Amino acid sequence: MSQYRLRMAVTLKPEVLDPAGQATQKVVAERGYPGVVSLRIGKLVDLWVDASSAEAAMALAQTLGQDFLANPVLERFEVWVINDED
Amino acid sequence: MKTKVAVIRFPGSNCDHDTVLALERIGAEPVTLLHHADNLRGLRYVVLPGGFSYGDYLRAGALAAHAPIMDALQEAVERDQVRVLGICNGFQILCERGILPGALHANVSGEFRCRMEWIEVVSTPAAWPGFTPGMRFRLPIAHADGAYRIAEGERKTLWESHSVFLRYHDPVNDSQEYSPNGSVDAIAGISQGSVMALMPHPERAMEQWMGSDDGRRFLSLWLEVNR
């Protein structure tokens, strides 16, 4: 058993409206930052998982994302293994 | 004999007490059950009240959807067709649990909306013949995440299966497109089998001084009592 650290990014699907992102982008534009054409806000979930292999840890995280951490109607997620120094 | 109705209280529920009072007012006998209970004590009617649950962290209703009482509720619905009413956060919980299709997303306006709305019955739920198409109710909404969303492929099925129970209605312009939160097809409530849910709060409209007493009519129809 080793411990793996994984990071999951949960983001709204591109077609789903993001009022928080829009409001933030509006203020960014008002403050005069140039060139920001779109801004969308998601969630970042860090997981520390005891598992027999990185693949097993990854499989668990995938299940967790599908069942719980992301809502498949609105969101999608991506998960990757990260090093402790990150 | 009074009909007993379970009212589920999650950490953060804040309309549970109002719901209890409203149910008493229409002649029912409410019984408050806590989120960690593992059974419904054999009760045949259940309300998931509004407010918040578990701080609505992760997503509104997402954590409550995995509470022990929800295992019991899902089993009771599947096995005994126990009658469920989800109000506001209760609607969000039922969608997050997958008992009802779709999801409730942030209001298009980005605002928390708290005001009176008209809602109209679209189709009669099979379990509740008392609700007939065209029937209207004036009820308050109070939510930040009330925009109903469903996968594009499932939207047609939703209509074809008569699961679209309530829509928002704009009496001034008689508009079918009006929605205070940006719900797809202006959907305010869904019904499938023995489960129904809506974003507006019937328990907050029980007397004329509250701005409307249509909640009394709504809850009586849900409970199938003549009042």
Image (cartoon, rainbow, N blue to C red):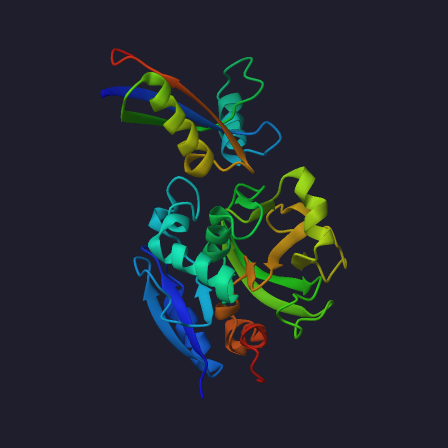
Residue at the limit of the structure toward the bottom, as seen here: B1
- Answer with left or right where residue B142 lies relative to residue B151: left
Number of marks in the rendered image = 0
Residue A24 drawn at (x, y percent) = 48, 28
The one nearer the camera, B36 or B123, is: B36
Residue at the limit of the structure toward the right, as seen here: B174
The one nearer the camera, B100 or B174, is: B100
Can residue A44 be seen in this snapshot?
no
Placement of B158 over or under B15, stated as above or below: above
Residue found 48% across the figure and 70% down from its top: B203
Residue found 66% across the figure and 45% down from its top: B184
Q: In which quadrant will I find the N terminus of chain B?
A: bottom left
Q: In which quadrant will I find the C terminus of chain B?
A: bottom right
- Answer with left or right where residue A74 lies relative to residue A54: right
Residue B102 drawn at (x, y percent) = 58, 46
Placement of A77 over or under B152, stated as above or below: above
- Answer with left or right where residue B16 lies relative to residue B167: left
- Answer with left or right where residue B56 lies relative to residue A77: left
Placement of B56 over or under A60, stated as above or below: below
Task: Determine the image quadrant of residue B200.
Answer: bottom right
Residue found 42% across the figure and 35% down from its top: A69
Can residue B149 be seen in this snapshot?
yes
Placement of B43 over or under A52, stated as above or below: below
Residue found 32% across the figure and 25% down from its top: A46
Residue B58 drawn at (x, y percent) = 39, 39
